[in-house]
Amino acid sequence: MKKILFAVLAIVVFASCSQKDITEPEPQVTGSVFYKDANIAITDVKAKGEGSAMKLQFSSLYEKNVAKMEIMSGPYENMLCFIHEESIPSNSLQRKNYNITEDNANTTQRYYVIKYTLKSGGWILTPAFKYTK
């Protein structure tokens, strides 16, 4: 009896490990990816100083179940303020390019964090991107 119970338990464990959820196919992610999870993939993050302004550029390879995207910036990694907010109306499996200009960013070092608010109410924060003039 113990052998049969053990065999059934082993079959259940192995069967559960081999099943996968049925979802839509993931887009191809190539190149230098800054951040990636099931909802977003961020690539090609760059910053460029232009006088007292700072231009942040990045691309999203896909955005799924996302309601809003916000950019936070500051002179220190633990001292950030919101500088940009944008609604995301629908899912996208296509590359989207973002260009955000921050005026009066007069520091030699700048940190940027991208915050995504999901339609479920949860949110995602990317790691800080550091720009040094």
Image (spheres, rainbow, N blue to C red):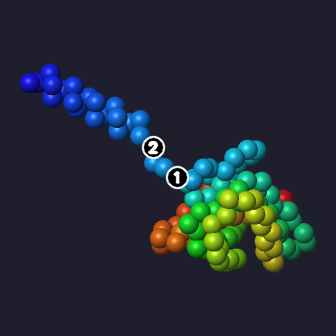
Q: Nearer the viewer, residue 61 or 3?
A: 3
Identify the element where label 1 is drawn.
loop
Task: Note whether residue 16 is visible.
Answer: yes
Query: How far apart are the alpha carbons under marks 1 and 2?
Result: 9 Å
Tell me the residue at 64%/62% (across/down). Answer: 63
- The answer to which image quadrant residue 51 occupies is bottom right
Tell me the residue at 64%/76% (across/down). Answer: 89
Task: Note whether residue 105 is visible.
Answer: no
Going by the image, does 117 lie left or right of 81?
left
Residue 123 in the image, given as x and y percentages of width and height: 52, 67
Residue 30 in the image, given as x and y percentages of width and height: 73, 44
Going by the image, does 22 lie left or right of 55?
left
Residue 54 in the image, given as x and y percentages of width and height: 82, 69
Tell me the residue at 67%/70% (across/down). Answer: 71
Residue 110 in the image, given as x and y percentages of width and height: 74, 64
Q: Disc 2 residue type?
A: Lys
The residue identified by callout 1 is: 23
The residue identified by callout 2 is: 20
Image disc number at residue 44: none
